[in-house]
Image (cartoon, helix red, strand yellow):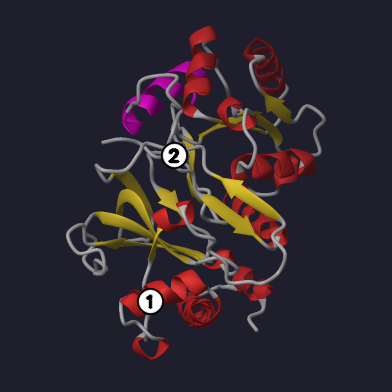
């Protein structure tokens, strides 16, 4: 049995690789869908010596199958927003405490204690439906904040404008996390000059506005909020961990998460030369589902291990968690 707490104690790449290989063996044995996928590829644990040998499950499987490596009771089912008429992904979670550890420790690694921030959530499209893992995370962060002003905003952006100006002028540390179209609506209403606020976009126009490339979106938001950088969160329904960008679209992962890229012409080949390709995610927090996911995003890995999202495969639908079009 793998100690779930060991996931969040990883300190070196060697420790990551060791635990990733252990989790691969565990999921190969306990996840029927993943086992069938590996069998079709003739990939057995005896064939897997390094993390680049591990098969990555195409993310589309979450739309049609229950991806579980645990027989414990499902505590919550997170669902993707999808587009009208399209199938949505379902991520069945049997241990919410792992998700909570992941987003708490991940955020604090990059930004410090959550309780020190006023957390303002501007996520109308997510609040308007059930099953959003992003809403679950932000709601928990709001509860952990020591400031009574923390909370969600739906359509009351005029109130948010006044609250944001007041809190920022008082010198409080603020995190405004919002979906792209709603942040643009806010700066259309008022031009800010913020000094103590982190603006974090989670992507997605949700059909409310024309899709923008990241540079154009961030330029509008920087000008509107009067800040030097726009932060971003890279997460998705099928994962239990997030990467964060503190500016310029350069994302970093916590120690239990790693990004690889695969060849765009051969999905089973992992790039080893920093070449752009399809993004594969290793998320060790996803121990009770599948930790090895081949996404529909296109990305590039930098020499320091950080990564950039540069688009999506042409045949995939646009969706909301920080996924920009080319």
Residue 216 lies in quadrant: top left
Give the CA separation, mark 1 to mark 2: 29 Å
**Main SS of residues in magenta:** helix
Residue 205, position as x, y percentages in the image: 44, 26
Determine crowd level at label 2: few under 14, some 14-19, many 20+ residues with C-alpha closer than 10 A. Answer: many
Helix, strand or loop at label 2? It is: loop
Helix, strand or loop at label 1? It is: helix
Work out which quarter of the rendered image holds the N terminus and state it: bottom right
Q: Is residue 127 above or below residue 317?
A: above
At x 39%, y 46%, the residue is 250
For residue 192, side relative to residue 301 (left or right): right
Tell me which label, 1 or 2, sits earlier in the chain: 1
Q: Is residue 54 visible?
A: no
Q: Is residue 186 magenta?
A: no
Residue 264, position as x, y percentages in the image: 21, 57
Q: Is residue 242 above or below residue 165?
A: below
| Nearer to us: label 1 or label 2 | 1
Total number of numbered discs in the rendering: 2
Q: Is residue 247 visible?
A: yes
At x 61%, y 41%, the residue is 132
Residue 311, position as x, y percentages in the image: 29, 42
Image mark for residue 38 = 1
For residue 145, side relative to residue 301 (left or right): right
At x 74%, y 38%, the residue is 142
Residue 226, position as x, y percentages in the image: 49, 20
Query: What's drawn in magenta, residue-wise?
Result: 213-227
Image mark for residue 322 = 2
Q: Is residue 219 magenta?
A: yes
Mark 1 and 2 residues: CB-CB less than 8 Å, in contact? no
At x 68%, y 72%, the residue is 5
Closer to us: 93 or 254: 93
């Amino acid at each position: 049995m793998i100690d779930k707490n060991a996931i969040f104690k990883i300190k070196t790449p060697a420790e990551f690789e060791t635990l990733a290989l252990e989790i691969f063996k565990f999921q190969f044995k306990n996840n029927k869908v993943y086992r069938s996928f590996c069998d079709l590829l003739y990939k057995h644990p005896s064939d897997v010596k390094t993390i680049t040998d591990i098969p990555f499950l195409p993310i589309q499987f979450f739309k049609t199958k229950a991806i579980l490596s645990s027989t414990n009771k499902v505590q919550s089912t997170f669902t993707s927003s999808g587009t009208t008429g399209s199938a949505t992904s379902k991520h069945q979670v049997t241990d919410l405490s792992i998700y909570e550890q992941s987003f708490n420790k991940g955020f604090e690694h990059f930004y410090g204690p959550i309780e020190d921030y006023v957390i303002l959530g501007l996520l109308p499209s997510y609040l308007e439906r059930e099953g959003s893992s992003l809403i679950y995370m932000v709601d928990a962060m709001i509860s952990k904040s020591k400031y009574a002003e923390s909370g969600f905003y739906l359509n009351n952006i005029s109130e948010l404008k006044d609250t944001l100006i007041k809190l920022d002028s008082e010198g409080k540390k603020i995190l405004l996390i919002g979906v792209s179209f709603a942040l643009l609506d806010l700066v259309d209403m008022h031009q800010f000059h913020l000094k103590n606020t982190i603006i974090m976009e989670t992507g997605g126009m949700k059909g409310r506005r024309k899709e923008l490339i990241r540079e154009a979106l961030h330029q509008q938001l920087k000008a509107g909020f009067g800040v030097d950088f726009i932060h971003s969160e890279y997460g998705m329904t099928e994962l239990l961990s997030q990467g964060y960008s503190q500016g310029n679209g350069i994302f970093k992962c916590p120690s239990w998460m790693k990004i690889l890229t695969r060849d765009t012409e051969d999905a089973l080949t992992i790039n080893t030369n920093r070449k752009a390709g399809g993004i594969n995610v290793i998320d060790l927090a996803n121990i009770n589902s599948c930790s090895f996911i081949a996404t529909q995003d296109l990305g590039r890995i930098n020499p320091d291990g950080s990564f950039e999202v540069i688009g999506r495969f042409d045949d995939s639908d646009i969706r909301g968690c920080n996924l920009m079009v080319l």
